[in-house]
Image (cartoon, helix red, strand yellow):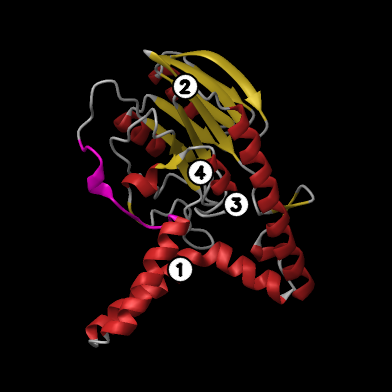
């Protein structure tokens, strides 16, 4: 139980460990403890490079939209466990007008949202289960692989876009099981063991998705992956040649969920050998879910 707990603490909370290392380094610098500050600073840099948690490279990408670019937006409507304002979300989507839109945890009751998206994209929208996908380009091919849409877009040169929503820690035996459900040590043990087993499921799902990607075509994989950077699932995507757009062009931690605490579990990945990142940013989610 103790080794499992320690392993999960490092796995889940390494962004906060990084924050601690960075703060200690700054305090030591202020106290002129140069050697100790250097040790903590090096530890921060090494761990951050291994986990790709904090982005510090916003100036390594072009700030202006170049010719031949494609913009994508991925968002989990109910990701923060709150009711969302459909009208507010429609205004955000209308302002950004991404070429490719992916909304997870969509339900049939979200008719206002579907009508707006369908109108914005000229009817080129599709609902599959709890996923809503829309594109201003023709979706010439759509296949289903486990945990994802498999969509090939026509935009000059062909582009493969995979949208996914990987398994969540908050389900146990197909029942909703959150930290609020823990009532005793036995419940805590069951929850921790579930996190461990679901992490394996996400890793297997990432392998399935990676194996489905064509080798000769530019690819984007995006969505609610329910896992942090540096996790086994994200490592599978990295081994397949996909790069985290936030690590490449983001600034700071970039959390995408705040309940029960801030984490970045939604990601946009791309193949740097055939695509170049122009800009990466996180939209404000207050009132959107």
Taking the magenta stretch, the answer to whether it contains residue 203 is no
* Residue 185 relative to residue 215: left or right: right
Q: Which residue is mark 2?
A: 217
Q: Which residue is mark 1?
A: 16
Answer whether labels 2 and 1 touch (C-beta < 8 Å).
Answer: no
Q: Which residues are magenta?
A: 52-63
Residues under labels 1 and 3: Cα distance?
A: 18 Å
Q: Which residue is mark 3?
A: 232
Pointer 3: residues within 10 angstroms few (<14), some, or many (20+)? some
Q: Earlier in the sequence, mark 2 or mark 4?
A: 2
Residues under labels 1 and 4: Cα distance?
A: 22 Å
The residue nearer to you, when weighing 114 against 172, is: 172
State the residue at coordinates (35%, 45%). Answer: 248
Mark whose residue sits in front, 1 or 3: 3
SS state under label 3 = helix
x and y percentages locating residue 194 in the rendered image: 73, 58
In the image, farthest residue toward the left: 64
Q: Earlier in the sequence, mark 4 or mark 3?
A: 3
SS state under label 2 = loop
Q: Earlier in the sequence, mark 1 or mark 4?
A: 1
State the residue at coordinates (63%, 73%). Answer: 6
On screen, residue 103 above or below 167: above
Q: Which residue is mark 4?
A: 238
Residues under labels 4 and 3: Cα distance?
A: 10 Å
């Amino acid at each position: 139980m103790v080794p499992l707990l320690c392993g999960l603490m490092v796995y889940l909370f390494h962004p906060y460990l990084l924050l601690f290392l960075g703060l200690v380094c700054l305090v030591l610098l202020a106290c002129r403890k140069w050697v100790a500050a250097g040790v903590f600073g090096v530890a921060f840099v090494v761990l951050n490079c291994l986990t790709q948690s904090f982005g510090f490279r916003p100036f390594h990408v072009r700030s202006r939209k170049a010719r031949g670019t494609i913009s994508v937006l991925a968002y989990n409507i109910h990701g923060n466990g709150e009711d969302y304002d459909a009208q507010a979300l429609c205004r955000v989507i209308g302002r950004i007008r991404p070429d490719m839109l992916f909304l997870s945890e969509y339900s049939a009751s979200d008719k206002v949202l579907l009508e707006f998206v369908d109108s914005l994209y000229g009817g080129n929208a599709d609902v599959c289960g709890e996923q809503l996908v829309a594109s201003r380009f023709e979706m010439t091919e759509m296949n289903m692989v486990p945990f994802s849409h498999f969509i090939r877009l026509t935009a000059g040169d062909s582009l493969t876009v995979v949208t996914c929503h990987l398994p969540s820690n908050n389900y146990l035996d197909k029942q909703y099981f959150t930290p609020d459900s823990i009532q005793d040590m036995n419940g805590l043990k069951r929850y921790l063991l579930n996190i461990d087993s679901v992490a394996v499921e996400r890793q297997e799902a990432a392998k399935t998705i990676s194996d489905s990607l064509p080798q000769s075509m530019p690819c984007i994989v995006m969505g609610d992956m329910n896992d942090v950077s540096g996790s086994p699932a994200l490592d599978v995507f990295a081994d397949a040649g996909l790069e985290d757009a936030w690590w490449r062009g983001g600034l700071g931690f970039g959390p995408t969920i705040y309940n029960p605490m801030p984490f970045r579990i939604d990601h946009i990945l791309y193949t740097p050998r055939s695509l170049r990142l122009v800009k990466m940013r996180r939209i404000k989610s207050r009132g959107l879910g």
